[in-house]
């Protein structure tokens, strides 16, 4: 008798910097620790079934509420649904799949599922929303050979040890590293059109200012990060913090080893610090003005 093909996952990875991701930080700020509990429960339910769930948000909210036993915490089902709706708004749940197919899934979920099941025999994938280009990107990122569904890394060979620094880099002199970090690739601005994706305006600005190169290994992930961050924050606030962060990295450009990573962390920190800044300053000015009026009244 043929063995039944496995559909779901026994486990799935969670990044150690999950709490630093813009969407997670935003929702944690709005809903606290309850959001993280709901999000983890949501992922376990999806991945245990594969990469999608055939249910409405009402049904999903009820299932999560029951699983987490929120009745003991006086949290109702509507509260869970509110968080799920916010996740949909942040593209953590695909709106089109939910509206037209009646299924809960997302591109991020399907990318992780694809990476986790590379050894499995390829089967029909209903409700699949990843494009061939996006699948290829996942394959390149995880080192998956799309032709034979195998990993192109032999961890037993010295030349493919991903946990060690390459021999060339380890023997590179300090002077060569400094020379490389200071090199300005003036062809970047002309080579932007050769990228396999459409860089957004802000990424182009960084490239043209020679703060970022199109040859960065994670340039597309950085481009996606900028687009997601713009969607999560007020546009005027984002522009202000982007310019401040750009000037900030400009001043210490030569000292930064990983520009993309440094920019991501700095921009997130600046956005959080500046959120509500104008309102706080307005309130402070009003309090000072009121205080001065009181002093003037007493003197008269």
Image (tube, rainbow, N blue to C red):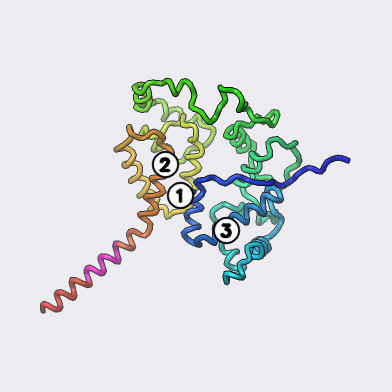
* Residue 207 visible to an observer of this rendering: no
Helix, strand or loop under label 3: helix
Residue 264 relative to residue 155: left or right: left
Whole-Å distance between the Cαs marked 3 and 2? 34 Å
Q: CA distance from mark 1 to mark 3?
A: 26 Å
Give the quarter of the image for residue 253: top left
Instruction: Classify residue 298 as left or right of residue 19.
Output: left
Question: x and y percent of residue 271 in the render?
Answer: 39, 52
Compared across the picture, whether 144 is left or right of 34 comes to right
Residue 282 belongs to magenta span: yes
Q: Secondary structure at mark 2?
A: helix
List the residue tagged with mark 2.
Answer: 202
Please give the name of the residue rendered at 70% of the width and 29% of the height, measured from the top-left corner. 148
Q: Where is mark 1, residue-wise?
A: 230
Residue at 22% from the left image edge and 68% from the top image edge = 288
- Is 270 on the left-hand or right-hand side of 298? right
Looking at the rendering, the stretch of residues picked out in magenta corresponds to 281-289
- Evaluate if marks 1 and 2 touch, with contact meaning CB atoms under 8 Å apart: yes
Q: Alpha-carbon distance for marks 1 and 2?
A: 10 Å
| Label 2, residues with CA under 10 Å away: few <14, some 14-19, many ≥20 | some
Say which residue appears at 58% left-offset and 56% top-offset: 39
């Amino acid at each position: 008798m043929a063995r039944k093909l496995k559909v779901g996952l026994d486990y799935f990875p969670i990044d150690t910097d999950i709490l630093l991701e813009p969407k997670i930080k935003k929702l944690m700020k709005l809903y606290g620790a309850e959001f993280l509990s709901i999000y983890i429960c949501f992922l376990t339910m999806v991945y245990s079934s594969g990469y999608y769930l055939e249910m409405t948000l009402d049904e999903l909210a009820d299932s999560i509420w029951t699983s987490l036993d929120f009745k003991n915490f006086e949290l109702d089902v509507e509260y869970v649904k509110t968080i799920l709706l916010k996740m949909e708004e942040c593209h953590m749940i695909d709106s089109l799949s939910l509206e037209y197919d009646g299924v809960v899934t997302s591109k991020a979920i399907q990318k992780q599922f694809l990476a986790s099941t590379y050894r499995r025999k390829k089967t029909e994938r209903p409700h699949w929303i990843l494009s061939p280009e996006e699948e290829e990107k996942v394959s390149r990122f995880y080192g998956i050979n799309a032709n034979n569904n195998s990993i192109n890394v032999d961890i037993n060979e010295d030349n493919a040890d991903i946990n060690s620094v390459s021999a060339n880099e380890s023997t590179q002199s300090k002077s060569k590293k400094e020379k490389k970090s200071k090199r300005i690739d003036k062809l970047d601005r002309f080579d932007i059109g050769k990228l396999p994706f459409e860089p957004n305006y802000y990424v182009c600005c960084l490239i043209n200012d020679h703060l970022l190169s199109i040859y960065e290994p994670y340039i597309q992930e950085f481009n996606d990060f900028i687009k997601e961050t713009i969607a999560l924050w007020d546009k005027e606030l984002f522009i202000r913090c982007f310019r401040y962060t750009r000037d900030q990295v400009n001043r210490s450009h030569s000292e930064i080893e990983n520009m993309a990573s440094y920019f991501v962390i700095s921009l997130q920190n600046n956005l959080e610090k500046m959120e509500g800044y104008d309102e706080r300053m307005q309130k402070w000015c009003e309090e000072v003005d009121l205080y001065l009026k009181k002093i003037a009244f007493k003197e008269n």
